[in-house]
Image (cartoon, helix red, strand yellow):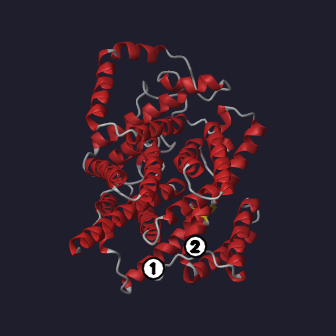
């Protein structure tokens, strides 16, 4: 990675042929639709070859290709019923092996990166995931989850940091490429909506095969909307580039609305409010007072609020769009809300059963069924309890890794927020400030959405999240180094 250098795209035929071949292979992966396994195997082998060439010829190109292919990747069956998102997870595995080999033969990672608080907390998180895997109720599942997280941190966090530390503008390039990769899934989703009637009831089917659920599809879309707003209105570039970003912004906004993900749209709205708080430099004390008054109001009128929630009859997943969004207040008869609360209660009961180590990473779906009670079960609940996750990043951590894992996750979020705010408020470099703001607001949508859903273990969401964390760390380190250099210059004078 010490040889990782960012140059402008060299217009050599070889480089363009490589990129073209990879995009062709990716398209073949979609159109084959796994109906021709022998031909699909040939495509996979060729993709492996192209990835290896990129890895040793132009590493930055492989990172760009990875950014582009994550939204386009499709699950491919492996041995023992396992699946691999091809080609993104395959590339991630290659990158992880490459990094491990480089470290073993003497590559030195930046000390400023290793000692950064966010890196240290991520190391603690990995170590605790391994410890809780030893204590897991199903160790083989937990070890797999640990390996996946390890690969994500190496490929998405460490490797992209190496890219970003060379030039902060690479952050914007990676985000732009990822947005371009989302265009095809968006148009396929539009096509499915057209065929199925633009109804909230078909939202989960419409975004397939690229996203298996409308909630993660919506979460990814709103994650990049702050970046697109900045690129469309603040980016200092050529007119046709700004026009392109404006069209992308319009496309993403329409797609986010048609995802019919209430949590995604709510997270985007709250992210906008946080932007206004930062923009107008609202003092922390005013924010605390407002939050306290809001909580006090809820406590005072809690009986009225609960009565309203009990009487609310709006339900989601119907053809009435207005009813779909109003149903967020219905916690009794709306199936989606009722089942989410059922999962939350189960997660809490699992934590009470095993508060120290939890049930082990990745095991929630195998055990939550026995913690269900009839009064909390919805019409889509199963007695087997085999329908997925805890519907919350936070409660998922609590039930699977115990109290320490949960608190460490909260600490990670707190340090990410404080680091980003320090850069935004204190940097003298307007470019660093703007980039950090864009990345921070995207992460805010994830942190808020994480209350209602859990996606960190899928590469479709893990890639934007860990790459964004790497971006904030690189901006923080770069800004601190710049300030030190200025101090040294002043002292010399």
Q: Residue at x 59, y 44 (%)?
A: 213
In the rendered image, the vertical position of residue 436 relative to residue 166, given as above or below = above
- Left or right of 68 in this view: 374: left
The answer to which of 289 and 178 lies nearer the viewer is: 289
The quadrant the C terminus occupies is bottom left
- Left or right of 374 in this view: 6: right
| Residue 485 image point, x, y percent | 30, 71
Judged from the image, the secondary structure of the residue bearing numbered disc 2 is helix
- Residue 398 visible within the image: yes
> Rounded to the nearest whole Å, what is the CA distance between mark 1 and mark 2?
12 Å
| Residue 381 image point, x, y percent | 51, 33
- Left or right of 387 in this view: 116: left
* Quarter assignment of residue 54: bottom right
In the rendered image, the vertical position of residue 116 relative to residue 379, given as above or below = below
Q: Residue at x 29, y 37 (%)?
A: 283
Residue at the limit of the structure toward the bottom, as seen here: 105
The quadrant the N terminus occupies is bottom left
- Left or right of 315 in this view: 353: left
**Circle 1: is it few (<14), some (14-19), or many (20+) Cα within 10 Å?**
some
Residue at label 2? 62
* Quarter assignment of residue 394: top left
Q: Residue at x 72, y 48 (%)?
A: 187
**Circle 2: is it few (<14), some (14-19), or many (20+) Cα within 10 Å?**
many
The answer to which of 99 and 81 lies nearer the viewer is: 99
Upstream in sequence: badge 1 or badge 2: 1
Residue at label 1? 1
């Amino acid at each position: 990675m010490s040889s990782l250098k960012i140059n402008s795209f060299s217009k050599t035929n070889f480089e363009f042929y490589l990129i073209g071949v990879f995009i062709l292979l990716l398209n073949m992966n979609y159109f084959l639709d796994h109906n021709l396994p022998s031909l699909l195997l040939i495509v996979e082998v060729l993709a492996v070859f192209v990835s290896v060439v990129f890895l040793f010829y132009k590493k930055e190109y492989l990172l760009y290709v990875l950014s582009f292919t994550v939204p386009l990747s499709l699950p491919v069956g492996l041995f023992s019923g396992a699946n691999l998102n091809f080609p993104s997870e395959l590339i991630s595995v290659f990158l992880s092996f490459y990094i491990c080999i480089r470290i073993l033969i003497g590559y030195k990672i930046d000390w400023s990166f290793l000692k950064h608080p966010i890196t240290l907390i991520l190391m603690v998180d990995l170590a605790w995931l391994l410890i809780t895997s030893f204590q897991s109720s199903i160790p083989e599942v937990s070890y797999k989850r640990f390996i996946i997280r390890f690969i994500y941190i190496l490929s998405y966090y460490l490797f992209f940091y190496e890219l970003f530390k060379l030039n902060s503008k690479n952050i914007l390039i990676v985000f732009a490429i990822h947005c371009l990769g989302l265009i095809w899934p968006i148009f396929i989703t539009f096509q499915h909506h057209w065929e199925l009637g633009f109804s909230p009831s078909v939202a989960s089917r419409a975004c397939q095969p690229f996203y298996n659920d409308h909630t993660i599809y919506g979460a990814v879309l709103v994650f990049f909307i702050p970046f697109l707003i900045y690129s469309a209105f603040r980016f200092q570039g050529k007119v046709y580039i700004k026009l392109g970003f404006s069209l992308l912004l319009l496309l993403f906004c329409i797609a986010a609305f048609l995802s019919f993900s209430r949590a995604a749209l709510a997270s985007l709205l709250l992210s906008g409010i946080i932007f206004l708080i930062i923009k107008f430099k609202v003092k922390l004390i005013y924010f605390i007072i407002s939050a306290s008054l809001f909580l006090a109001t809820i406590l005072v009128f809690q009986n009225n609020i609960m009565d309203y929630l009990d009487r609310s009859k709006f339900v989601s997943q119907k053809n009435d769009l207005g009813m779909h969004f109003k149903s967020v207040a219905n916690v009794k008869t709306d199936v989606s809300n009722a089942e989410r609360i059922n999962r939350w209660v189960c997660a809490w009961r699992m934590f009470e059963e095993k508060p120290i180590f939890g049930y082990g990473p990745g095991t929630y779906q195998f055990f939550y069924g026995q913690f269900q009670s009839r009064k909390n079960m919805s019409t889509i609940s199963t007695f087997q309890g085999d329908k997925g996750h805890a519907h919350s990043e936070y409660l998922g951590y609590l039930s699977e890794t115990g109290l320490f894992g949960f608190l460490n996750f909260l600490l990670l979020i707190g340090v990410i927020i404080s680091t980003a705010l320090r850069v935004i408020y204190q940097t003298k470099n307007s470019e660093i400030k703007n980039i950090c703001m864009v990345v921070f607001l995207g992460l805010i949508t994830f942190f808020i959405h994480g209350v209602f859903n859990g996606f960190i273990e899928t590469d479709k969401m893990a890639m934007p999240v860990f790459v964004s964390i790497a971006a904030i760390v690189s901006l923080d380190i770069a800004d601190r180094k710049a300030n030190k250099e200025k101090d040294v210059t002043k002292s010399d004078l």
